Image (spheres, rainbow, N blue to C red):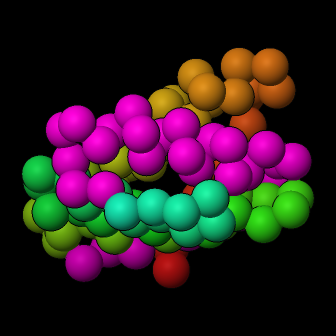
């Protein structure tokens, strides 16, 4: 498993977490509260999110045979769509 982490500065972390979770809930396994969420993708990847007052912390797990760069982009682009008022958000992805 390859692990990527990022801390996204935003005052709307909980709102974006919930929007993303609801958006993907009809296609994927999703569990969430206003503070935390986990989304499991069909390809075996898993997205974990934690909303704080000024940041959205993200941990992305991608199987060894998966495309980590593509999964980072999928998550980033979807969150940017929900954050259109303040997009683009800052995603400083690093290996975890």
Residue at the spot x=78%, y=66% of the render?
Answer: 52
Residue 35 figure quarter: bottom right
User: Residue 79: x, y in percent?
Assistant: 57, 36
State which quarter of the image contains the N terminus.
Answer: bottom left
Residue at the spot x=55%, y=46% of the render?
Answer: 18
**Of the pair 3 and 55, the residue shown nearer to us:** 55
Left or right side of 55 for 40 = left
Left or right side of 91 for 54 = right
Residue 49: tell me if it is visible: no
Residue 67: tell me if it is visible: yes
- Residue 11 falls inside the magenta stretch: yes
> Which residues make up the magenta segment?
1-30
Q: Reply above or below: 36 against 84.
A: below
Residue 43 figure quarter: bottom left
User: Residue 26: x, y in percent?
Assistant: 23, 36
User: Residue 75: x, y in percent?
Assistant: 45, 43
Residue at the spot x=19%, y=69% of the render?
Answer: 63
Residue at the spot x=58%, y=22% of the render?
Answer: 81
Q: Reply above or below: 65 against 82.
A: below
């Amino acid at each position: 498993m390859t692990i990527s982490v990022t801390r996204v500065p935003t005052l709307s972390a909980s709102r974006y977490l919930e929007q993303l979770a609801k958006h993907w809930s009809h296609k994927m396994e999703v569990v969430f509260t206003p503070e935390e969420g986990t989304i499991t993708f069909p390809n075996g990847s898993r997205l974990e999110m934690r909303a704080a007052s000024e940041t959205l912390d993200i941990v992305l797990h991608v199987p060894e045979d998966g495309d980590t760069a593509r999964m980072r982009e999928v998550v980033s682009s979807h969150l940017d769509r929900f954050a259109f008022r303040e997009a683009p958000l800052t995603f400083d992805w690093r290996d975890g």
